[in-house]
Amino acid sequence: MSKRIPISFEFFPTKTDAGAEKLKIVHQELQQFNPEFFSITYGAGGSTRERTLAAINDFNGKGTPVAPHLSCIGDDKARIAELLDIYKAQGIDRIVALRGDLPSGQVGLGELPYATDLVRFIREHTGDHFKIEVAAYPEMHPQAESYDADIQHFIEKVNAGANAAITQFFFNPDAYFYFVDRIQKAGIDIPVAPGIMPITNASNLIRFADGTGAEIPRWIRKQLATYGDDSASIKAFGHEVVVKLCERLIEGGAPSLHFYTMNHTEPNRQLVLDLGLA
């Protein structure tokens, strides 16, 4: 059994009423584990703004705190300020502040082109009301000029007012520990929660990794390939890989774990149980 540490879960806003009803069930099922918070994602350029707000309204005030994602690229200060005011009025006190992706076909980065600009704007507009979570990239942001430059960008986000961070998913714990060591040597001591991606579908995992710059170690890719379309074997292998990853992270001092649920109860529920974090 692992040492007990806090956990949190990420949802994305659904496109249909049926999806929203299903997500309410998933929320209820995962809430039994007493997570620190549920985060709700926000589409490129605010493309899911209304659906994100609807999901926040569904879950806010129902036990576990919610943390809206807020991305800034391609957006303007007035719209972001409006959202911050809405969330503050609802009693929400945690924001996941991200640069986000530029919407397809849009020209121009907007008034707040980088996550550091967004963090600074949140502080200017709302003071210390929100605990601000930012993204961290143990294996380097896919668009970063270099690893050192990426570390410097992270330091700038913290200096602008970030309180904590959640990483991109990864499967190499040494990358996480090296990242934390680098920022600590630079005088940064905020908690950095590893982002955990369950493995349930090989093609989806590879697509996610290719889109985010996350590395899937060769041995994992090769083993997944041997299973072909045997989903039961893929899930069993994936579960073992992720449990061992989490155990190593917890043993190494990770302050918490953040699960990318993909809006499903399983295998997140079983991971929490097998790790002794329930």
Image (cartoon, rainbow, N blue to C red):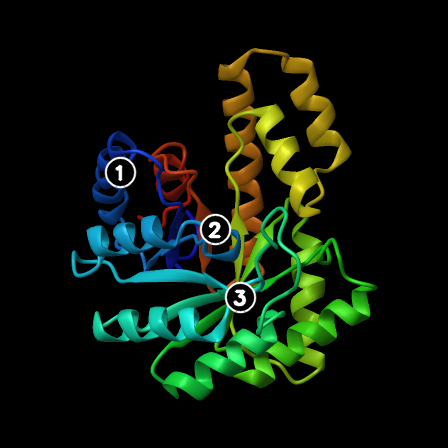
Toward the viewer: 110 or 186? 110
Which residue: 58% across, 45% down?
Answer: 245
The residue under label 3 is which amino acid type? Cys
Which residue: 79% across, 71% down?
Answer: 149
Which residue: 83% across, 64% down?
Answer: 146
Of tags 3 and 1, which is closer to the observer? 3
Q: 10 Å neighbourhood of mark 3: few (<14), some, or many (≥20)?
A: many
Residue 126 x/y as whole percent:
37, 84
Toward the viewer: 111 or 42? 111
Circles 2 and 3, Cβ within 8 Å, touching? The answer is: no
Residue 253 x/y as whole percent:
54, 64
Whichever of labels 1 and 2 marks the residue nearer the N terminus, that label is 1
The residue under label 1 is which amino acid type? Ala
Whichever of labels 3 and 1 marks the residue nearer the N terminus, that label is 1
* Residue 264 horizontal side relative to residue 175, left or right: left
The residue under label 2 is which amino acid type? Gly
* Residue 165 horizontal side relative to residue 131, left or right: right
The answer to which image quadrant residue 70 occupies is bottom left
* Residue 212 horizontal side relative to residue 77, left or right: right
**Residue annotated with mark 1:** 20
**Residue annotated with mark 2:** 43
Residue 127 x/y as whole percent:
39, 88
Of tags 1 and 2, which is closer to the observer? 2
The answer to which image quadrant residue 23 occupies is top left
Alpha carbon distance from label 3 to label 1: 25 Å
Q: 10 Å neighbourhood of mark 1: few (<14), some, or many (≥20)?
A: some
Question: Residue 72, labelled with which disc?
Answer: 3
Q: Secondary structure at mark 3?
A: loop
* Residue 162 horizontal side relative to residue 5, left or right: right
Q: Residue furthest left?
A: 62
